[in-house]
Amino acid sequence: MAAGVLVSFVVVFALVLCAVSVAMKFFEAKRKSQVTGMLKTASGESRTSLSNLLKEAEPEKPTGIKTLLASLQFSRQAQIQLTEAGMNWKVSRLLAVMGAMAAFGFALGIAFPLLLNGPTTALSLAAVCGVMPYLFVRRKRKKRLAALEEQFPDALDFLARSMRAGHAFSISMDMLGQELEDPLGQEFRGLFNEQNLGAPLDIALRNFAVRVPLLDARFFTTSVLLQKQTGGNLSEILTRLAYIIRERFRLKGQVRAASSHGRLTATILTVLPIATTVCMLLVAHGYLEGMAADPDGKKLIGGAIVAQVLGRFFITRIIDIKV
């Protein structure tokens, strides 16, 4: 049994190292290609199309682990998640952290076999610990998008006032990027710098909408592009758009207040079993030892954990009302 566990650990560790090595080589090649394309754009050389920096083109003939990652599209999706979270990590670094956490969970499961047996506990903890860095990135992305959404109405008002004062749209974007706090200020600075490098305004705005995957950003991009094609008072359009966004915030606040009871219920139902278990372990340590040692008790513990996770997931889906 010990030899089998050791072989399994060595195989998992080797696969993680191979994945990290392949991902690092792949994204280094893509980075060089992107820099070359940006330099060609800035120098004025003709190009048939301007590719989005976030859309990674697949290699011509992927092999081995590259084929698996390409089929799952994990690398591209993970890079988008990292970019939207405002993290400077590469996918290779995320994979390395996930692999290290998975190895830690595997070793912890071997040392403390809480479920059916050592290998089952090790694989379960390896899967849970391995996915934790990715969940952390998604949580950080959610918080950053919420901050972007909160800043957007003020940014639109700033642009409208700047254009009413006589500044051009590009100069107003530069001023907004300098004056506005991050994270939205960083995105507008990137929009202005991309346009200065030679990208057309419509391409730069579309790339901005990809980097900021908000409904408000799409409204802003569509408004500017329509005004560019058909004419009109852009400052008045942006002012009305800021008003609409604030009204949507007000409606979202009402929905959040109405669903507060469901969020409180979800929190209590999630925390109460965990807190009860911890208190019982502290007060009567031997009370649960028999259940953890019995095979049927281990099955019940595993089923309770799975039911807890599923219950939390479904309650969250029910109370997550999109506005």
Image: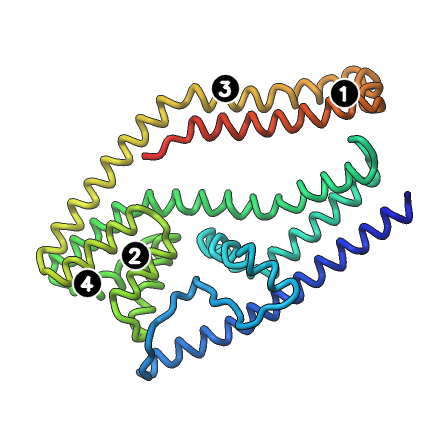
The tag on residue 179 is 2
Q: Position of residue 124 (x, y in %)?
A: 72, 39
Distance CA(mark 3)–CA(mark 1): 25 Å
Q: Is residue 8 left or right of residue 305?
A: right
Q: Earlier in the sequence, mark 3 or mark 2?
A: 2
**Crowdedness of circle 2 by 10 Å Cα count: few (<14), some, many (20+)?**
few
Figure check: 172 above or below 125: below
Q: Residue at x 34, y 78 (%)?
A: 41
Task: Check the picture and name the quadrant holding the C terminus.
Answer: top left
Q: Position of residue 116 (x, y in %)?
A: 80, 31
Give the number of marks.
4
The tag on residue 132 is none
Distance CA(mark 3)–CA(mark 2): 42 Å
Mark 3, secondary structure of its residue: helix
Q: Is residue 33 left or right of residue 41?
A: right
Depth check: give the residue in front, 253 or 37: 37
Task: Check the picture and name the quadrant holding the N terminus.
Answer: top right
**Crowdedness of circle 1 by 10 Å Cα count: few (<14), some, many (20+)?**
some
Q: Residue furthest left?
A: 232
Q: Is residue 13 left or right of residue 196?
A: right
Amino acid identity at mark 2: Glu
**Do tag 4 and tag 1 residues touch (Cβ < 8 Å)?**
no
Mark 1, secondary structure of its residue: helix
Where is mark 4, residue-wise?
A: 169
Where is mark 3, residue-wise?
A: 265
Where is mark 1, residue-wise?
A: 281
